[in-house]
Amino acid sequence: MFFILLVLLMNPLFRSKTVNYIKSDVAVLLDNSRSVGVEKGRYEGEKTYQNVLEQLNFDDQARISLSFFAFDEQLSSVRPDTLDFDGAETNLYAPLDYLQRNQEGTKAALLITDGIYTAGQDPAFMSRDLGVPLYVIGLGDTVSVRDLVVKNVVSNQKGYTQTEHKVEATIINDGYKGENVTVRLQSGDRVIARQNFTPTNQKSAHTLSFQIPLQKPGLHQYTIEVPEKASEWTGANNQKAFSIDVRDNRDRVLHLAFEIHPDVKSMRSILATDKNVSLTPRTWMRGEKFIEGDLPTETDSIDLVILHGYPAPDISNVLHQQLETLVRDVPVVFVRSPQQDLNDLPSSLESYMPISTTSSSVSPLSSGFYPVEAQSEHAIMDLPEVAYSNLPSIYAPIRNVELSPSASALFKTTYQGSETEVPFVAVQQLGNKRSAIINGYGFYRLRQHHAASSRSFITRLISNIIAWNAADTDDKLLRVIPAQQVFDGDDKVQFNVFLRNESGEQESNASIDLRLQNEAIGAKQFTMTSEGNGQYSLNIGTLGEGIYQFEATARKGETTIDRYQGEFSVSPTRIEYVNTTRNDNLLRQLAENSGGRFFDFSQIDSIWHHMSNAGLMDETKHIETQQYYPYQHLFWFFAVVLLLGMEWLLRKYFALP
């Protein structure tokens, strides 16, 4: 015991050494993109790739520790037997970036690829500072093959009916010097147009222009295609799809006449000959009856309603309610007629009327009209020059009529050569709601006048009034914008969404659901994520080829704020087939810059030997030294206590002092 105490008081230091041998860690980076599965020349695609993996015989490399990673669009940890060679893109930068950030303990990397990268940064810049030698095995073939590629298609995503839509296609020729090449523009199986060119060089690029006549509204999908030649190595890159969202270029105008008058015929004649207008005429008879057919009630099919002679006597309450629904949802133009009395206008429609009467007696008189100079820049006032004093007279009120607070007068009446303050043409915009009034009748006389300037003036004036009122005022509170109108087959389908509330403020606390529909997948529901500031996003992932329709609904609590409908299309993927020639220059550069070595896939028998000679497969000797002081361990404390206790018991037992 006294010896132990003496040792503890001397505080000696004890050391021990343990020798460990650690295997070298080698990262194996495997290209899993579609281009490495392409059969070309002496390279037989997946078969050759599998042979390379078998020759490397990873199971017999007991001297080293292997970590396997596959890369295409991104990097992931895998087993070599799980590769599917179906990656839509090749990001060769990703595995090198991972090595640089996680190289501790990694002695070398085995990179197996064709060197064709289609995504990410240029990997050559990373290789100089990698810090890990790359032993590169080149897959694929460097043999030049004959090929025709639809490289790019340029087209506006939106178009309008009754117009010619320009499309430009870039075709890459490789090996068809002096041969005729046909390029077709197709809609489904129907060939819309075709052009031919004959390359004068062995390798060249050719840009061709096509004009597509747009007839029907909707999302239409087209294809630029080069028919595959017998000597061409693959036809997978011979076409590219694109879509055009065709919108009706004409304003859909519903003209409701409540009185038979020459103005009605004159206005309908102007609208019928306007190529920008699709006219639906209805002439009221009695009750809810119209001569030409039933009253259209679907407001989605109407851009503008013209109420000519409304309100008229004896209109039923049912028709009043139907018209109120139309005017509430669709821009409106009021046109005066002889039997009309604005004092009979329903109170529910007064807010849409740009003028109001101040007396029960408002009698139109033979008048003229003049333009309001302050409104000369208004879009409706883009009119041909005319001498207003020489125009035929019209009938309009000259008193007891005033503008609504939010309206503007574009023309005012004159009486016996004197200007009045009574509006003849007035417009109003409340938020996104537009309305106008022609506060007089008899303008058919201008249409029938012998002077061409008078006829031209009234035609342009009415056309301008219609166009301004029917124009889209961007009134949607909810806007859902696909990141692309045409997604490639391997693009992630994403949406950018913007939402405002009824006050026009950004709304970030709503719930937005999107219903996606396609013949192949049926209907699916998705919920969007709020990004703040009234912005939302949704990433659906990849979808199959086809045209998709979507409808988004924004709700807050039990209230529906707005809905939005749209379409987009998904085309087949093709980027991995555009270039299939192995990039030996890049592969050699990666190997040399990192201190490694390049091998062709047919010459890998010695790869492990080269790595071994470079010392990259040697185990690392690791000596671990441990040291301790006895006083730091409880064992000695318990030993001293035990011995002291035993001494006390012995002394007690033998009655020793």
Image (spheres, rainbow, N blue to C red):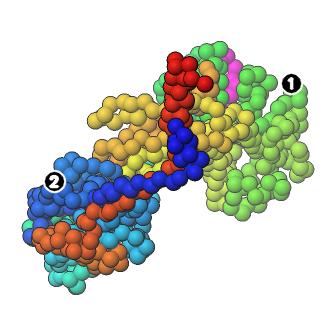
Q: Given the image, on which type of amino acid does mark 1 rest?
A: Ser
Q: Is residue 337 visible from the viewing direction of this image? A: no
Q: Quadrant of the C terminus?
A: top right
Quarter location, residue 440 = top right
Q: Residue at x 14, y 72 (%)?
A: 606
Q: Nearer the viewer, residue 186 or 216?
A: 186
Q: Bounds of the magenta span? A: 308-316
Q: Where is residue 382 in the image (x, y as percent from the top left)?
A: 69, 58
Q: Is residue 595 left or right of residue 366?
A: left
Q: How crowded is mark 2: few (under 14 residues within 10 Å), some or many (20 or more)?
A: few
Q: In this view, does 52 lie to the left or right of 585?
A: left
SS class, disc 1: loop
Question: Residue most toward the bottom?
Answer: 200
Where residue 360 is drawn, which disc sits there?
A: 1
Residue 536 against residue 627 in the figure, above or below: above
Q: Where is residue 436 in the image (x, y as percent from the top left)?
A: 71, 40
Q: Residue at x 67, y 56 (%)?
A: 457
Closer to the chain start, of discs 1 and 2, is 2
Task: Read off the residue under disc 2.
Answer: 59
Q: Position of residue 373 (x, y in %)?
A: 83, 57
Where residue 275 is drawn, which disc sits there?
A: none
Q: Is residue 177 visible from the viewing direction of this image? A: yes
